[in-house]
Image (cartoon, rainbow, N blue to C red):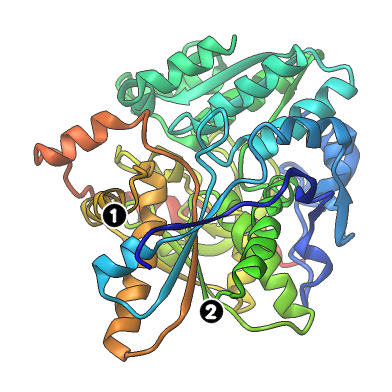
């Protein structure tokens, strides 16, 4: 049988609880520090930015957190998302490996991001919040929060990294269709943005800068909160629904992964697919090899330093210990805008330090080549970010072929590429080139890491 096989769960199998890996780790992650005092933050320190329900999830050590029924009701529009066995890709690669992919592109916004956008909007609505500010890179997060804001009657303002704002007009149009306001970052609207533009009026922007702008607005307006689409613990928890469903679907298939692959920028889709399996391993279950794939032009896990750093360029956020390229680092304008973040989720970084995962970096052209190969075998065109996971999975399958070993490979196809066709047009025309960061800029950014006394 050479056709792709689809494994679909009944909607009654949508998980009722999110999974929190903090409950199973052999060592707790380092504390989050106040940017001024350099002391561990408490819930009150985060209250200007987030509703208390999300703050309590952020600091929770409980293994399971109940998913509110209104959130599960919205999830039913696209969840459980399908799991496919990629038999046609296996045949094309002539590999003995069994390749499965969890497809998150079936959501209204076309990616995994609504898994956390919907609960974040719900908890803000419950707290009486009227407006939410956020940042976005490629626009998947911005369009997802815009979608969720429309459902709950919230005003959404998105600061979109300028290079992506220019490259991806249809993502911006989708946000506006849902009723959100989208602004190119850096902008003249905030002190943070104006400071960057004063130094370089043509600055392409970065997620760190866009975060500074969104946080500044939220912190200075009583009726406004801030939402983040990746990095934070509560975001990674919300995404655990992906891995939990995959576990149930693989049980239907009578299989279990030997290798799990995910693309990494801030860490949300990667944690979503991998953390439930890592947690099962930590509780005595089967061992899995977990591989995080990142862009070579923004390689926080493979080239970054594990250190305390700010989550934003303007130094408005708390200090977290993570793999970082430095908060002032600006990646080149490659097309996988969702992976252009200077740091990695603290919990993902901590798991790497514990030896629970490994990391690889790939260039832009090689991941697009893998994405096209995948599309021609499986019929789904991946987002530029997801192409990194495709490339990682293909390489693992070819490794099985070389070694003559059959392994089960699972990866998260975190979104479709329908809003990224200009990137594919450029690729086929030979205009999509491998971009490289400035080594001197990286050295300067790392040299400017904040001085923090070990807790």
- Determine which residue is flagged by label 1: 377
Q: Is residue 173 depicted above or below 353 in this figure?
A: above
Residue 223 at x, y = what percent? Answer: 80, 13
Which label number is shown at residue 201?
A: none
Quarter of the image where one finds residue 429: top left
Mark 1 / mark 2, whichever is N-terminal: 2
Residue 69 at x, y = what percent? Answer: 87, 35
Circle 1/circle 2 CB separation < 8 Å = no
Q: Is residue 113 left or right of residue 385?
A: right
- Badge 2 marks a residue whose secondary structure is loop
Which label number is shown at residue 258?
A: 2
Q: Nearer the viewer, mark 1 or mark 2?
A: 1
Q: Is residue 186 depicted above or below 59 in this figure?
A: above
Q: Residue at x 47, y 29 (%)?
A: 139
Nearest to the observer: residue 132 or residue 300: 132
Q: Is residue 306 left or right of residue 241?
A: left
Q: Residue furthest bottom?
A: 404
């Amino acid at each position: 049988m050479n056709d792709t096989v689809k494994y679909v769960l009944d909607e009654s199998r949508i998980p009722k609880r999110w999974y929190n890996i903090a409950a199973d780790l052999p060592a707790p992650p380092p504390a989050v520090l106040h940017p001024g005092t350099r002391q561990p933050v408490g819930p009150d320190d985060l209250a200007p930015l987030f509703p208390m329900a999300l703050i309590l999830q952020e600091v929770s050590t409980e293994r399971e957190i109940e998913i509110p029924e209104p959130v599960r009701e919205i999830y039913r529009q696209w969840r459980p998302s399908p799991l496919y066995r990629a038999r046609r890709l296996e045949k094309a690669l002539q590999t003995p490996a069994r390749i499965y992919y969890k497809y998150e592109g079936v959501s209204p916004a076309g990616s995994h991001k609504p898994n956390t956008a919907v609960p974040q909007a719900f908890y803000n609505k419950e707290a009486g919040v009227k407006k939410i500010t956020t940042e976005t890179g490629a626009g998947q997060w911005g369009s997802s929060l815009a979608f969720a804001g429309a459902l709950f009657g919230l005003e959404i303002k998105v600061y979109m990294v300028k290079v992506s704002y220019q490259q991806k007009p249809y993502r911006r149009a989708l946000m506006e269709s849902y009723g959100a306001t989208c602004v190119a970052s850096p902008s003249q609207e905030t002190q943070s943005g104006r400071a960057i533009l004063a130094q370089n009026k043509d600055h392409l922007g970065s997620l760190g800068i866009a975060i500074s702008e969104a946080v500044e607005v939220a912190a200075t307006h009583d009726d406004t909160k801030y939402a983040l689409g990746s990095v934070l613990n509560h975001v990674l928890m919300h995404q655990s629904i992906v891995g939990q469903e995959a576990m149930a679907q693989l049980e239907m298939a009578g299989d279990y992964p030997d290798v799990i692959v995910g693309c990494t920028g801030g860490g949300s889709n990667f944690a979503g697919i991998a953390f439930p399996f890592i947690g099962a391993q930590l509780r005595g279950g089967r061992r899995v090899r977990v591989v995080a794939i990142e862009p070579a032009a923004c390689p926080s896990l493979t080239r970054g330093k594990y250190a305390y750093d700010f989550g934003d360029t303007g130094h408005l956020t708390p200090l977290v210990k993570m793999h970082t390229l430095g908060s002032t680092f600006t990646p080149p304008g490659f097309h996988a805008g969702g992976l252009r973040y200077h740091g990695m989720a603290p919990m993902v970084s901590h798991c790497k330090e514990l030896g629970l995962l490994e990391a690889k970096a790939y260039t832009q052209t090689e991941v697009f080549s893998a994405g096209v190969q995948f599309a021609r075998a499986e019929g789904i065109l991946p987002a530029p970010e997801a192409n990194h996971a495709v490339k990682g999975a293909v390489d693992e399958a070819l490794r099985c072929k070389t070694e003559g070993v059959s392994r089960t490979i699972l990866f998260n196809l975190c979104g479709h590429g329908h809003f990224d066709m200009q990137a594919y047009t450029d690729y086929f025309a030979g205009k999509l080139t491998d971009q490289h960061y400035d080594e001197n800029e990286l050295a300067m950014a790392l040299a400017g890491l904040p001085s923090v006394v070990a807790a």
